[in-house]
Amino acid sequence: SSQGSSPAIAHVYRGTFVHSTPHTALQILEDALLGVDTEGKIAFIGKGEELNKLSQSCGFSPSEVIQLAQHEFFMPGMVDTHIHAPQYSYAGTALDLPLLQWLNTYTFPVESRFKDLEFARSVYTQVVKRTLRNGTTTACYFATIHTDASLLLGKITNDFGQRALVGKVCMDINNAVKHYKETSEESQEETCRWYPLVKPVVTPRFALSCSADLLEQLGAIAKNNNLHIQSHISETIEEVNVVKKLFPDSESYTDVYLKHNLLTDKTVMAHGCHLTDEELALFRETGASLSHCPNSNISLCSGMLNVRNVLNHKVKLGLGTDVAGGYSASMLDAVRRTLDTSKVLTIQEPDYCTLSFEEVFRLATLGGSQALSMDDHTGNFEVGKDFDALRVNVAAPEGPIDLVQVDEPKVCDDRNIVEVYVAGRKVVPFE
Ligand code: GUN
Ligand code: FE
């Protein structure tokens, strides 16, 4: 082909496509035609009736078109903006303690076992397969402090075709499990060894696990190399109070991260249940985003994020499972819990502007992509973006059919997600 021409069409799908745009929370395109090129990008989106015209102008044969069934649709892959891969090993258990005790009693002892690469391989393979089957096409992972195991997580996501950011956890303070920490120097050196080898996200665990020196150095590493950053913020009242005591010179928890250059337009902070409006304004100004983790917030009795207030402050927002503070590795669960939390807030305050299903669908897809600063190439069906998609069968033979209505497409669980695509490549079912 001539120089400068676009890549050839690899696949064309015809049927219903459901997605979000910045203006429309849920847009349903019926009898649409969507072409994916050989690089996995969306080459065109048109109407079924334009088949002949499109096949000529885009160069494909109408006989190659893959026709969805009446009870099927495509939706964008979901984006889990906050998940702890090692904690999948005890997901669904150990939810009887508040955050800080929970970390000391369950989390740190388990995470320290990931020094063992074979244990890491086993757990990381399970969590990547499970989340892919659940429709998570992009995941933003916390690993552990172990560099080699963190690199292994990156390799496993790559092998299975999941789009992922991987964070080697940094922590030089641990008063409970004393062997599960690094020195500040080790943490910096290992961060610099690890980040060139994966799609990295610089990961100070949270303010209570990191010295001011380590926070500052990690901020510098992220800044000098233009890297993503993730951490936790204002998850529980107790945590906020301890941070206040340990950082008396900072005006707020948000200010602690801001002062150390950790609040940027490539930062995603988990929870934020107890942030003030002034702190939300700092998120807005810096372009930092929040990950709403409703299952975890309820399971550990941490708090309830006022999502409506976050959206009113125009802070970028995605959803996270926060395994294993959250007991479910499914983003569909995160969608349901987000709606539940919003309804509980409405019970408490009848004037509360409850989130709609459509808005939460957007948070799980485009919102997550925006929160991870990936919406230039993922998050919805736009020409030029990568084809990250779920083929949903609302009448899947083994699906819970009483929960589905074809005229108002609802996704029930992984049994209804029959195929998963990342950048045009079919990654579920597994080869
Ligand atoms: N804060 C610091 N570490 C963690 C963690 O592993 N899980 C949760 N939910 N909060 C944290
Ligand atoms: Fe977390």
Image (cartoon, rainbow, N blue to C red):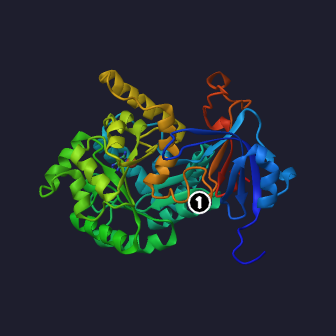
Q: Residue at x 59, y 48 (%)?
A: 77
Residue 295 lies, in percent from the top left, at 42, 36
Quarter of the image with the C terminus in it = bottom right
Q: Which residue is drawn at 41% across and 56% down?
A: 112
Q: Pointer 1: what residue?
A: 156
Circle 1: element type: helix
Name the side, left or right, on which 344 lies relative to 166: left
Q: Is residue 38 left or right of residue 197?
A: right
Q: Position of residue 291 (x, y in %)?
A: 40, 47
In the displayed structure, 340 sits above or below 305; it is above
Rendering coords of residue 184 (x, y %) = 28, 69
In the image shown, does 179 or 270 lie closer to the viewer? Answer: 270
Query: Label 1: how many residues lie within 10 Å, few (<14), some (14-19) or many (20+)?
Result: some
Q: Nearer the viewer, residue 227 or 118?
A: 227
Q: Which residue lies furthest to the bottom in this view?
A: 3
Q: Which quarter of the rendered picture does the N terminus lie within?
A: bottom right
Name the residue located 64 percent from the left edge and 48 percent from the top edge.
389
The image shows residue 221, relative to residue 137, as above or below, that is below
Q: Answer above or below: position of 41 versus 338.
A: below
Would residue 94 be seen by someone viewing this image from the given angle?
Answer: no
Whole-percent x and y of residue 150? 48, 63
Q: How many labels does the image show?
A: 1
Amino acid type, residue under disc 1 in the picture: Ile
Can residue 290 be seen here? The reply is yes
In the image, residue 362 above or below residue 11: above
